[in-house]
Image (spheres, rainbow, N blue to C red):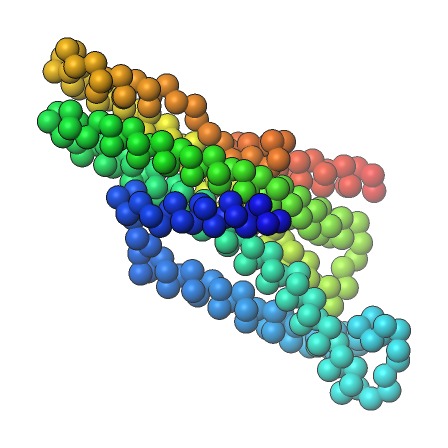
Amino acid sequence: MLRQKSDIRNLITSLNSHPTLSAPLKKTCSHFVNIILLVCLITPFGLASMATYMANEAKCLSNFWTFGITLEEQRYKTASHFFGEYVYYSVYFEFPCVAALSVYLMIYRCGNNLLQCNDNAKRMDYLELTVKCIDVQQDYGIVEENIRLLKKILSSPLLVILLSSLFNLLVVLTYCLKDNVPPCMMVELTVSTLTGVVIISSLIIRGSKIPENMLKIKETAGHLIEKHQLNILDKGREISVLKRIERKETIHLSACGLVDFKRSLLLTAFGSLFTYGLIILKLD
């Protein structure tokens, strides 16, 4: 745990200490993140209220949240049910959403560094390239090191988030395809479906941007070699730096090395859920 905190601190320090590689977060983006955080904090209260109301209307207020103790007065039953549902949704909805948002923003920052590095290289003409070719190599080396550190940091969290979201979706499929869903469980199943789909889709799409942006840099390096090859034919340093960048390995984020975060993983994940649903229907 201490090692993980140290790695996160080093990554954040590296991201903030190289202004030429990090474009500042736009105000609209910053406001949007704040709105998402506010929604995550408020939503458990609304979901608990909705679940309590539906359970009250369906006359299915149970003594689950009172550990089997039966309360006589209706207001105490309602209050205990609301409090239990609020704590449940705070842990079940708020924490996974905030954790996924934190992971998303870390990937977003590192992906933006790659884009900024690519834009810096694209804007260079021949004279600027001859002067700053070593800076280009150093900038790419810093960004690549950040990506490797990010992959190390997020390896286990991505696996936990992915498995948790898939498990929730499997539970929803099992309930919806096999059992008659009671009204008091509709809120929970709906929330599980939405959060699972949004978390899986957003993290896979954003995670796949890392190798895609690295490929863009390699394509830019190849384009610069072709564009200025005649000019720098007798100056091996510039073309050597660009070729070294072009031959660099493309890094994929992974969940403990089990799966790489590519766009095709979306098809694999939701295809597996579809197959699981068909199996449940056949068993019936």
Query: Which residue is painted at 21% across and 20% down in the image?
Result: 238
Q: Residue 3 appears at what percent x and percent y?
A: 58, 45
Query: Which residue is painted at 73% across and 64% down in the image?
Result: 185
Is residue 228 in view from this perspective?
yes
The front one of 58 and 130 is 130
Left or right of 14 on screen, residue 131: left
Is residue 56 placed above or below 207 in the rendered structure? below
Image quadrant occupied by the C terminus = top right
Q: Residue 132 appears at what percent x and percent y?
A: 19, 30
Query: Which residue is painted at 67% across and 48% down in the image?
Result: 164
Left or right of 196 on screen, residue 213: left
Is residue 271 placed above or below 126 in the rendered structure? below
Count of residue discs? 0
Q: Residue 27 appears at what percent x and percent y?
A: 31, 61
The front one of 24 and 264 is 24
Q: Residue 201 appears at what percent x and percent y?
A: 53, 45
Is residue 268 in view from this perspective?
no
Is residue 185 placed above or below 235 in the rendered structure? below
The front one of 29 and 146 is 146
Query: Which residue is painted at 30% across and 42% down in the image?
Result: 21
